[in-house]
Image (tube, rainbow, N blue to C red):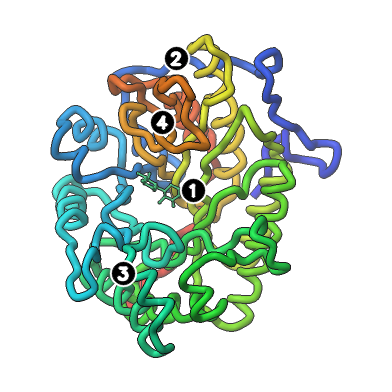
């Protein structure tokens, strides 16, 4: 697949997206407010657009639900399939929240991703304690029991799973860049990842299995180290025959804190594709903290960086879908998370729709990136079905 001009010609073409207000290349237009949703734009190159939701928001806010139906072809649970949502007690799973979201997806003809089976965070206290004190067989059961239960429950309904989320953390100091502070790694070593992917394949062989992580896109030393760590991890997993099939690039961008270079990110995605893996952008949003105080200017700059990021991502035919972490600024984790929120409590503007569900410049940037994207490569054949 031929790269677009700004990526052609190796070194000469390293184009960085400027991060200062004086240097924005062009203002993305204000969006068409009534045309087709992002899912229709994504479909033009054989891709999917979707977003994360919580069942509580879905129940309390019909305007959000309507916007999601209009825009999204796939949903993912922002909260409901993390273990402190599903397993408050050791002896009982509670899938009621996720069930509502899956029923919503089915009713509206949407696909669903599953997030997430194994994560160092969002685990109930009892689970942390049990992992520290149990013998190995029981530790493996604590990891695997959930994978098997969740994947079997939603077999045929959730077609992609974030099997292991955020396995690396170079800043914790291990030479291999693996996360040190994780109940799974502390108990089982890196083999917890192998076990998780093998059990996932057994539980539902037809669902695509993702390793997902953040901090893979900027030019900072932090992201450079993270890219290296994730590539090395993927290499080791594949060499051991671990059935990982795809990388999820979360895509939480910080346009006013760290730089973005198209060639660096493109090369990274090329390496991942070169390993035979598929890719998705699974949690896209842009933290606007530190940007211009003028809202229109800030929106324009956020949209410009979002467009540059997506142009690179969608130029890679292995990238099959883009999901934003929420849809409307009314509900964005960026407004509450310590590292991203504005100190004065102002709502973050890092999602495609504003807090009144109006399309913003970022919406237009996403739509245009989809419109200009070369076709995605064919999806992996589903085992048991004709290719
Ligand atoms: C976040 C949710 O958005 C919050 O509502 C929740 O309190 C904490 O988790 N990376 C991930 C997501 O993989 O699960 C996180 O979601 C955001 C960062």
Per the image, the residue denoted by label 2 is 30
Mark 1–mark 4 distance (CA, rounded to whole Å): 21 Å
Per the image, the residue denoted by label 4 is 335
Coordinates of residue 88 in the picture (x, y in percent): 23, 63
Classify mark 3: residues with Cα within 10 Å, few (<14), some (14-19) or many (20+): some
Coordinates of residue 160 in the picture (x, y in percent): 37, 62
Mark whose residue sits in front, 1 or 4: 4
Mark 3–mark 2 distance (CA, rounded to whole Å): 49 Å
Element under disc 1:
strand
Per the image, the residue denoted by label 1 is 281
Query: Does label 3 point to a residue whose CB lies under 8 Å from ligand 1?
Result: no
Quadrant of the snapshot with the C terminus: bottom left
Whether residue 263 is situated above or below residue 379 in the rendered picture: above
> Which residue is at a point 19% across and 39% down the rendered structure image?
58
Mark whose residue sits in front, 3 or 4: 3
Classify mark 2: residues with Cα within 10 Å, few (<14), some (14-19) or many (20+): some
The numbered mark, 3 or 2, whose residue comes first in the sequence reads: 2
Mark whose residue sits in front, 1 or 3: 3
Coordinates of residue 253 in the picture (x, y in percent): 56, 37
Mark 2–mark 4 distance (CA, rounded to whole Å): 23 Å
Element under disc 2:
loop
Q: What numbered label is drawn on residue 126?
A: 3
Q: State how many labels appear.
A: 4
Q: Answer whether labels 3 and 4 touch (C-beta < 8 Å).
A: no
Mark 3–mark 4 distance (CA, rounded to whole Å): 29 Å
The image quadrant that residue 157 belongs to is bottom left
Whether residue 292 is situated above or below residue 280 in the rendered picture: above
């Amino acid at each position: 697949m031929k790269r677009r001009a700004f990526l052609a010609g190796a070194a000469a073409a390293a184009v960085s997206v400027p991060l200062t207000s004086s240097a924005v290349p062009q203002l993305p237009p204000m969006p068409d407010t009534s045309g087709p949703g992002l899912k229709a734009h994504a479909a033009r190159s054989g891709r999917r657009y979707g977003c994360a939701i919580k069942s509580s928001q879905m129940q309390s806010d019909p305007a959000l639900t309507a916007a999601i139906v209009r825009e999204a072809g796939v949903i993912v649970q922002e909260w409901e399939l993390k273990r402190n949502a599903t397993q408050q007690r050791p002896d009982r799973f509670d899938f009621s929240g996720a069930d509502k979201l899956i029923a919503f997806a089915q009713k509206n003809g949407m696909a669903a991703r599953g997030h997430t089976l194994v994560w160092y965070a969002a685990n109930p206290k009892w689970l942390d304690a049990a992992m520290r004190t149990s013998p190995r067989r029981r530790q493996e059961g604590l990891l695997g029991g959930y994978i098997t239960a969740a994947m079997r429950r939603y077999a045929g309904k959730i077609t992609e799973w974030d099997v292991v989320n955020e396995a690396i953390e170079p800043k914790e100091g291990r030479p291999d860049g693996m996360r040190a502070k994780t109940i799974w790694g502390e108990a089982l070593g890196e083999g917890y990842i192998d076990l998780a992917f093998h059990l996932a394949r057994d539980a539902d062989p037809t669902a695509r299995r993702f390793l997902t992580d953040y901090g893979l896109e900027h030019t900072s030393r932090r992201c450079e180290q993270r890219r290296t760590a994730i590539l090395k991890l993927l290499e080791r997993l594949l060499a051991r025959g671990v059935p990982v099939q795809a990388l999820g690039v979360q895509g939480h961008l910080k346009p006013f804190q760290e730089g973005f270079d198209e060639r660096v990110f493109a090369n990274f995605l090329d390496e991942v594709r070169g390993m035979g893996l598929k890719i998705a952008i699974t949690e896209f949003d842009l933290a606007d903290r530190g940007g211009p105080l003028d809202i229109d200017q800030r929106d324009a700059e956020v949209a410009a960086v979002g467009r540059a990021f997506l142009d690179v991502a969608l130029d890679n035919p292995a990238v099959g879908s883009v999901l934003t972490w929420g849809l409307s600024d009314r509900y964005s984790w960026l407004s509450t998370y310590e590292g991203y929120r504005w100190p004065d409590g102002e709502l973050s503007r890092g999602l495609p729709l504003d807090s009144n569900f109006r399309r913003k410049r970022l919406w237009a940037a996403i739509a245009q990136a989809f419109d200009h994207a070369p076709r995605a490569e064919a999806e992996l054949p589903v085992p048991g079905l004709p290719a």
